Image (cartoon, grey):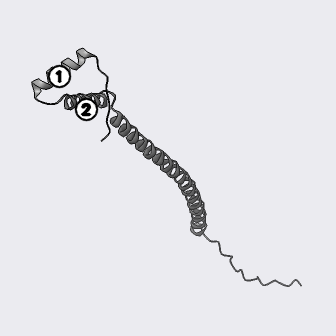
């Protein structure tokens, strides 16, 4: 285990010793507890792990948004292509419908069949 050597003012050392005796632990154990609590408070205050987790989460959200934007752009392009194809199809159907209407009109018009007229006999002049 790594070892740390501390130089403390006499007054701080006396306070630590008094508090350690009151708790029934060694001064070094008391210092470890204080250090551990200090680290925990720093994590809560500055959120080193929380900040990293938040950044990772935000990056994942940004990546998802970028993917969705690409999908939306692709879908918009396909939609435009389909609109053009549909418009062309409707125009084609309209054109064919017009042709059919004209053909039906022609079929409904009365047909004048030529009349065969027998030639008249000519009178001869005398």
Instruction: Give above or below for 81 relative to 61.
Output: below
Q: Secondary structure at mark 1?
A: helix
Packing grade of label 2 (10 A; few <14, some 14-19, many >=20) is few
Left or right for 1, reference 104: left
Please state which of residues 62 and 50 is positioned toward the viewer in this rendering.
Answer: 50
Q: Residue at x 73, y 83 (%)?
A: 118
The residue that mark 2 highlights is 36
Left or right for 62, reference 35: right
Instruction: Give above or below for 73 relative to 116.
Output: above
Q: Residue at x 43, y 46 (%)?
A: 64
Image quarter of residue 8: top left
Instruction: Point out the image quarter for the N terminus.
Output: top left
Numbered disc in front, either 2 or 1: 1
The residue that mark 1 highlights is 17
Packing grade of label 1 (10 A; few <14, some 14-19, many >=20) is some
Residue 116, percent from left and from top: 70, 80
Contact check, label 2 and label 1, Cβ < 8 Å: no
Please state which of residues 4 and 118 is positioned toward the viewer in this rendering.
Answer: 4
């Amino acid at each position: 285990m790594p070892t740390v050597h501390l130089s403390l003012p006499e007054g701080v050392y006396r306070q630590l010793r008094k508090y350690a005796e009151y708790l029934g632990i060694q001064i070094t154990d008391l210092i470890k507890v204080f250090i551990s609590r200090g680290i925990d408070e720093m994590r809560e205050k500055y959120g080193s792990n929380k900040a990293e987790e938040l950044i990772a989460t935000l990056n994942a959200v940004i990546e998802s948004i970028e993917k969705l934007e690409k999908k939306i752009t692709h879908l918009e392009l396909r939609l435009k292509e389909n609109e053009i194809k549909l418009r062309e199809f409707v125009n084609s159907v309209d054109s064919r419908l017009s042709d059919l209407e004209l053909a039906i009109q022609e079929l409904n018009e009365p047909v004048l069949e030529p009349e065969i007229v027998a030639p008249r006999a000519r009178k001869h002049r005398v």
